[in-house]
Amino acid sequence: MVEGGIIKADKVEFTECWQTIWKTPYIMRLALSAGIGGLLFGYDTGVISGALLYIKEDFDSVDRKTWLQETIVSMAVAGAIVGAAVGGWANDRFGRKMSILAADVLFFVGAMVMAAAPAPWMIILGRIFVGFGVGMASMTAPLYISEASPARIRGALVSANGLLITGGQFLSYLINLAFTHAPGTWRWMLGVAGIPPVVQFVLMLSLPESPRWLYRQNREDEARAILEKIYPSDQVEEEMNALQSSVEAEKADQEALGSNIFERVKQAVKNDVVRRGLYAGVTVQVVQQFVGINTVMYYSPTIVQLAGFASNKTALALSLITSGLNAVGSIISMMFVDRKGRRTLMIFSLFGIIACLVALSIIFFQAAAHSPLVGRLESNSYGQNSTCSAYLIEQHSSSWNCMDCLKATDCAYCTNSAGKYLPGACLASTDAVKDTLRAECRAHHGTWYTNGCPTKFGIVAILLLGAYIIAYSPGMGTVPWIVNSEIYPLRYRGIGGGIAAVANWVSNLLVSETFLTLTEHLGSAGTFLLFAGFSLIGLVAIYFVVPETKGLAFEEVEKMLQKGVRSKKGKGSADASSTKDQDTQ
């Protein structure tokens, strides 16, 4: 998973979950209705990767301006930062159900604005609306599911919501592939996202509010009525008492810490235990993004084209590999995180990530160094004013290859009809002649390249991207969220997790807003090597500041942070479970 929390659930809990929802279909209806938010979260963050290929074809300004492509992609992330902040407030002020309904409206409006956009700025506006919805859904859907489901299967249901996020990303790639030949291509890709929020909106109208929120609003009878639908009759009173104790404890904490968010952050930072927890929690969240995962998830088809696969359809089909492996990796993480430990999984994950990024850098460097040459005869064969102007005035044009051609302004490369690795043509790609020359290139049985060049290393790059996802997903993909659910004292868990989540979203925004610019200035090889460097720094940081929390009770984690030491191998003790949570204030 890329963004969004995850709650641990073991095999026993999943088994019990299946048995429970089989006996009580109401719980499944509730969880799946809210879980559509996770599906939308994944779809809207993944769909732009394929749609961008066709948006560039319809709008020359987007094709020419790298920053505009990056803005279209990253504005959803910027919107999500605001949406998450507003979502946290709306959850408490208006309730979980109303927040989900509001997110659905934002999703639908954003999808319709993008689908009907007459200009790039309208697409950006739609992406901002969708981002608001993504942010609210990331805050609200897991919260609603956890509060409106039985405690014994809560982890399994929230984990299923996490799987729906990666499932939504995979679905977005399938939808992209399905509409490659449809009139309007990207408009359908983005517009289809308007269907699930309508379905969720209708379903949520018939579902109740979270019993916890109702109890906090002194609507105890309504809260009890909902619990009676979820629990057997002999457990309802026990759950009501537990709910009362939990809500009273939460109110006491709020009174102790104050309602002002800035004051609460200030108190958290002053607390030695919380501050050490934040060092660990923020570190893993920032590292998660700076290993470059969202360059792959948001720009996967573009990266595939940089690897030498010019066809949009081929790029989308190959991108399914990365999305599918990401979903599989999330499942693997659930199986091993409690066996191997959080810190261990992240360290091994980073070793694999660094190896893959270095290998990708080498492959892209070799692909650039061995790209096909540009032939003077081939370039002149398309007629007067068809050859790239930069190529014509270059004194050493005889040494030009495909990469040199693509680096020039308003130029594209057409392969030789006798073989794509033979010298090809460097042609003009201005607005006036681009479509005509692209059609002529294809008529001559050539392939039109604007992003990458023909290379024998392309399939190796795709395999390394797959290996990168396999290395990332089970470790750095899910474990940072688990660490943040365990590393803070109970009283500070909300504020600590919120600070770390903001660090994650902001890092995500920085990476997604700069990737194409980096490839433009450093090349694909230099960009992947840069991310390998970031990953190495992250590995060192995690080794020194992140403790192992495997098997430790919350009280033991707090005691460990009080001492300021790292426990390389934590084991829970029977005594810890009986001790009270000791907050250092």
Image (cartoon, rainbow, N blue to C red):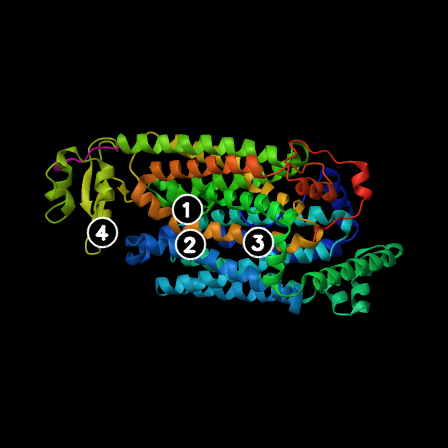
Q: Amino acid at mark 3?
A: Ile
Residues in magenta, as a range: 371-377
Q: Nearer the viewer, mark 4 or mark 1?
A: 1
Mark 4 vs 1, N-terminal side? 1
Image height of 44 relative to 524, above or below:
below
Residue 375 counted in the magenta span: yes
The mark that comes first in sequence, 4 or 2, is 2
- Tell me whether circle 2 and circle 1 mark residues in contact (CB < 8 Å): yes
Q: Main secondary structure of the magenta part?
A: loop
Farthest residue to the right: give it: 234
Q: Considering only order in the chain, which callout, 3 or 1, is on the residue closer to the N terminus?
A: 1
Up-down relation of residue 490 to residue 290 (above or below): below
The disc label shown at residue 519, or none: none
Q: Is residue 491 left or right of residue 43?
A: right
Q: How far separated are the C-alphas under marks 1 and 3?
A: 27 Å
* Label 2 sits on residue: 73
Q: Residue drawn 68% across and 39% down? A: 560
Q: Position of residue 315 (x, y in %)?
A: 39, 42
The Cα–Cα distance between marks 4 and 3, rounded to whole angstroms, is 48 Å
* Amino acid type at image mark 2: Val
**Would you name the residue on which mark 3 appears?**
499
Q: Position of residue 213 (x, y in %)?
A: 72, 64
Whether residue 223 appears in magenta in the rendering, the answer is: no
Q: Residues within 10 Å of mark 3 (few under 14, many from 20)?
A: some
**Residue annotated with mark 1:** 299
- Please name which of the two marks, 1 or 3, marks the residue nearer to the observer: 3
Residue at 22% across / 56% down in the picture?
431
Mark 1 Cα shell of 10 Å, populated few (<14), some (14-19), many (≥20): many
Q: Earlier in the sequence, mark 3 or mark 2?
A: 2
Picture quarter containing residue 86? bottom right
Front residue of this view, candidates 31 and 556: 556
- Taking the spot 67% from the left edge, 50% from the top edge, the residue there is 158
